[in-house]
């Protein structure tokens, strides 16, 4: 039989929104539990340098998340990492989450599940396809790589790869222009080690003897094969909503329709961070969402007494 744990506030997701909600929940003397399917920090862990977090200019993403986690731990919040929620029941006064080992019940839930990268879809698959240069870039020093995407993430991660010492980067974007900040574009494209192609897509990968040997690109000039040892993909993000799709109201794109107090269509359930429908997604906006969600959750819980 599974162990059952009861709390006031249950948080699903351990990125900046979830950890901020945990801090505020603990400070409100709510019994707070945070469940994270991977490790706390979310996608920020893969950010090389964060320049826009007030008071911490130039901080490494993982360092910033470690400091948030230390704050959560200091408040003695129960945090379960590598803890995959298999089932989530949000209707009714008592909320319930089930993992393979335990059952968690709560009076309020904050959904801070964030987003995940859109995959590169090609007929041929390869182990050398990555979605995080900081996590997986080191082995490619001295080698040629392909970067797919034309936004800030693609350019920032490409600069990081250059810093690791990759020999050359082929950068491809399927539309007719790049979308990264102009200063970042100038820094990357002026390096002399980057071939940048627009109106180009990756149609397939070339694998020889079990390892990636190259990629097939298709663009206005036709079809060309490039030799690369690794591929780094930055095509955007999609919402992690599988646990609660069909329970709370979502947009057509799959994001939570949250009110100004982060409330969802179900009483006692709140959305926070990148999973919410909103115009901007930043670490600071995630922190704001987590703050508001926890305060609103506290108000809801007090109303049940």
Image (tube, grey):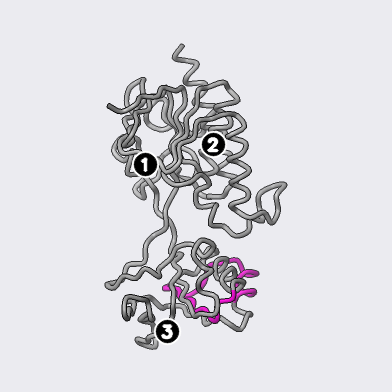
Of marks 1 and 3, which one's residue comes earlier in the chain? 1
Residue at left 37%, top 41%? Answer: 84
Residues drawn in magenta: 165-188
**Secondary structure of the residue carrying numbered label 1:** loop
Q: Which residue is mark 2?
A: 290
As measured in the structure, the alpha-carbon distance from the residue carrying label 1 to the one carrying label 3 is: 38 Å
The numbered mark at residue 84 is 1
- Element on which disc 3 rests: strand
Q: Is residue 68 or residue 294 the one in the foreground?
A: 68
Query: Seen from this angle, which residue lies furthest right?
Result: 55
Quarter of the image where the N terminus is located = top left
Question: Are dots 1 and 3 in contact, CB under 8 Å?
Answer: no
Q: Position of residue 71 (x, y in %)?
A: 62, 36
User: Mark 3 or mark 2, which has the lower sequence index?
Assistant: 3
- Residue at point 44%, 14% (across, down): 304
Cα separation, mark 3 vs mark 2, equals: 45 Å
């Amino acid at each position: 039989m599974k162990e059952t744990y009861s709390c006031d506030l249950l948080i699903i997701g351990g990125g900046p929104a979830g950890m901020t909600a945990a801090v505020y929940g603990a400070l409100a003397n709510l019994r707070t539990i945070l469940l994270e399917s991977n490790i706390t920090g979310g996608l920020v862990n893969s950010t090389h340098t964060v320049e826009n977090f007030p008071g911490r200019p130039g901080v490494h993403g993982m360092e910033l998340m470690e400091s948030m986690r230390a704050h959560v731990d200091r408040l003695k919040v129960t945090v379960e990492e590598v803890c995959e929620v298999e089932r989530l029941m949000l209707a009714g006064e008592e909320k319930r989450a089930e993992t393979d080992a335990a059952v968690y019940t709560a009076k309020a839930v904050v959904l801070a599940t964030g987003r995940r990268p859109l995959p590169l879809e090609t007929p041929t698959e390869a182990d050398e396809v990555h979605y995080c240069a900081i996590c997986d870039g080191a082995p490619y020093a001295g080698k040629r790589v392909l970067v797919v995407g034309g936004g800030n993430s693609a350019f920032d991660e490409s600069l990081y790869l250059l810093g690791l010492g990759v020999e050359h980067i082929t950068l491809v974007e399927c539309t007719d222009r790049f979308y990264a900040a102009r200063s970042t574009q100038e820094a990357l494209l002026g390096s002399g080690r980057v071939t940048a192609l627009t109106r180009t897509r990756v149609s397939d990968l070339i694998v020889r003897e079990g390892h990636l040997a190259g990629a097939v690109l298709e663009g206005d000039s036709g079809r060309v094969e490039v030799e690369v040892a690794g591929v780094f993909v930055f095509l955007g993000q999609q919402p992690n909503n599988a646990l609660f799709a069909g329970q709370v109201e979502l947009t057509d794109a799959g994001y939570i329709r949250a009110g100004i107090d982060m409330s969802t269509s179900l009483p006692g359930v709140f959305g926070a961070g990148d999973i919410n429908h909103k115009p901007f997604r930043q670490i600071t906006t995630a922190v704001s969402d987590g703050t508001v969600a926890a305060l609103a959750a506290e108000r809801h819980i007090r109303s049940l007494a």
